[in-house]
Amino acid sequence: MSESKDFLRSIVEEDLKSGKYKEVITRFPPEPNGFPHIGHAKSICINFGIASDYNGHCNLRMDDTNPTKEETKYVEALKDAVQWLGFDWGKNVYYTSDYFQKIYNYAVELIKMGKAYVDSVDEEQMREYRGTVTEAGKRSEYANRTVEENLELFEKMKNGEFKDGEHVLRAKIDMGAANMKLRDPLLYRIRHVNHHRTGDEWSIYPMYDFAHCLSDYIEGVTHSICTLEFENNRDIYNWVLDTLGLELPRPYQHEFARLGINYTVMSKRKLLELVEEGKVSGWDDPRMPTIAGYKRRGYTKESILNFCDQIGIAKANSMVDVAQLEFCIRDDLNTKVPRVLTVLDPLKVTIVNYEGSEVIDAPYYPHDVPKEGSRDIPFSNEIYIERDDFNENPPKGYFRLTPEQPVRLRHGFIISCKEVIKDETGKVVELKVEYHADSKSGSDTSGIKVKSAIQWVSAKEAIKAEVRVYDRLYANEAPESLEDLNSSSLTVIKDALIEPAIVTEKIDERFQFERQGYFYADPIDYTDEKPVFNKIVGLKDSWGKKTAPKQESKTESKKQAKNEQVVGTEVAMSDEQQALFDKYTSELKLNAEVSNIIARDEKLSSFYADALAELNSPVGIANIVVTEVARELKEKEANELNFTAKQVSQLVKMVDDKTISSKIAKQVFEEMVKSGDNPDKIVEAKGLVQISDPSVISPIIAEVIEKNPDNVEKFKAGNNKLLGFFVGQVLKATGGKANPQVVNKLVAQALK
């Protein structure tokens, strides 16, 4: 846990300190009436995270009180989401339906106390009697029924002797209450529907407000954490538990702000409409904001968890920019996935002065990614390049292949165009080029200066693949209906070409298709014979540049989007931006994603230059500029910041010198944002110097291993992925101060 706790954790700590509870028990109680979405991911992280932080437990409970909408497939989807995100609910999944008899008995108790009655007015009259915000409601005449009458009617309701809607059970509270939720709320309604677990055993089902608090109590939940829309329901929650006089300890409800993301809908009703209307292929369509959709698209659980951590826990609702989620997946994949060559829109190229064939050894990862691995790329006199990488009449600032301008084939040779072949319509169908034999990448002695490198594949060995390019499902920032759907949210490319190692070596299921974006082998449709890849995310956020300002009409927006110069799906760089991009990638050795982000933003590129003037650490400074400084410069100018470029370079130097870890650097940066203090002063004041001494780290490792015997067994049985779990636990125990490299080495030794 970080030193600055959110308000929910502060409540939990106070409750434990006061002795209110001996153990923290939370719960994640979704309704199994749809697939869980990204908003549920936030709730999962909060409930399971708080329980884990305080050595408690989080129950997974299906709130299955409405059989008209619930299905077993939704239960399985919810379980899968929790597991995939890395959380453990223990031995049992709980169901509200497990407690139907107990909840019914509690309802009988309320009737006997004169606190509940069977009402028989129709829905329209019930609405009329409810009153308004400024006028008190009117109690139904049926509230005068005797306890005996109510007990008899309620039992008949249970036995299925009445039709749907003929009667309801209501609490008798206060028809004049300022909180309209307390105006005799419904406790039970009749539903002659088969339940996915209890079958036809019950003809009545409890309402959420009645079942929820009692289920929490039955399970021993201490902190019932809900989103803000349930704030007014808290009064009913407390009324039920207090009126029944249940034995302490009892649970209390606490609310946090639900997750809202622009260009996204998270109403289950609207998501179900998308599925039923055939606007998407299903709940796991990669454009859907469901956990299943993100999984199929290729998002990693780490990116989702990091996003939930970044947005934090607030008390007031707000809208999060979807670009932040997209940044999290880019940031995660950047250090993980191999880079490969692909051509999505092939243009044939014949190298007229090359004979035979050879293989070019090319690394999978750029120099700033701490992973090793390479593959052989076949090269011959017939290759394919991207159609956009050649222009016969190039605009100013075009740095790829032209009749007069040579270009480098990525990892290979420099080529010059000699002849352009067109079909009868004037479309370019082939290029005749010459290669420069002394220009091979890594041993170039040609002296030829080129401004960019392009991707390519060998015609003979390239493998045909289907590539699904996904964009945002909605074109409107605040979508309301199906009319707001983005008609270009999916483009299917049937004849893309990929280098053979992607299929033959298959070192990963996710790849960066260079200069295109990150892609994932579709977990359902992919086969080695017919490869299918889903685009996870582009190399940069170009959406804001493609869409018109908010005040423009939809027609004007479409006009502007149509008239913009676009390369693939991304807006073309200006001359100045392209020059910076080339400098960053060729001279400073930054990767393409980081170079794109900095080059396209004038404030970022200026800040980066100032920081670089103070310290020659281009990669380290670039990484903190795109991950941390960019967030602060989004709505501010550089002179409005509490920190300077010089201070950022000092912070990077401390990381480079291994005085602090990268994780600690984020904490230090957050303090710099608030206080403006120099990083060395913050590190000294908070005691954040990185721990590299094995004698300090080893006892912590021993303690972590002792606490997790089950995972030790699994690791020794062959589950090597658990090494990351143990390293993470040690880093957490040291507040992120331990040197990750030292921890990795020591943990591996300790688990042998």
Image: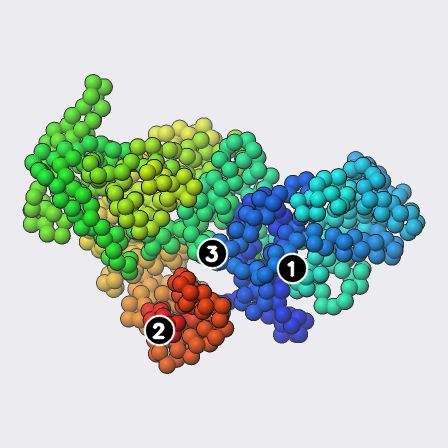
Disc 2 element: helix
Q: Residue at x 70, y 41 (%)?
A: 194
| 150 on left or right of 367 | right
Vertical arrangement, residue 578 with respect to residue 489, above or below: below
Q: Residues within 10 Å of mark 3 (few under 14, many from 20)?
A: some
Q: Residues within 10 Å of mark 1 (few under 14, many from 20)?
A: many
Disc 1 element: strand
Residue 591 rendering spot, x and y as whole percentages? 27, 52
- State how many labels appear: 3
Front of the two marks 2 and 3 = 2
How far apart marks 3 and 1 lie (CA) works out to 21 Å
Residue 110 rendering spot, x and y as whole percentages? 83, 55
Q: Toward the viewer: 355 or 222?
A: 355
| 635 on left or right of 384 | right
Amino acid type at circle 2 is Gln
Amino acid type at circle 1 is Ser
Image colouring: rainbow
Q: Toward the viewer: 537 or 626?
A: 537
| 168 on left or right of 284 | right
Front of the two marks 1 and 2 = 2
Amino acid type at circle 3 is Leu
Q: Residue at x 12, y 41 (%)?
A: 357
Q: Toward the viewer: 597 or 124?
A: 124
Q: Is residue 683 visible?
A: no
- The residue to which callout 3 is attached is 305
Q: Residues within 10 Å of mark 2 (few under 14, many from 20)?
A: few
Residue 233 rendering spot, x and y as whole percentages? 70, 52
- The residue to which callout 2 is attached is 749
Q: Is residue 81 visible?
A: yes
- The residue to which callout 1 is attached is 224
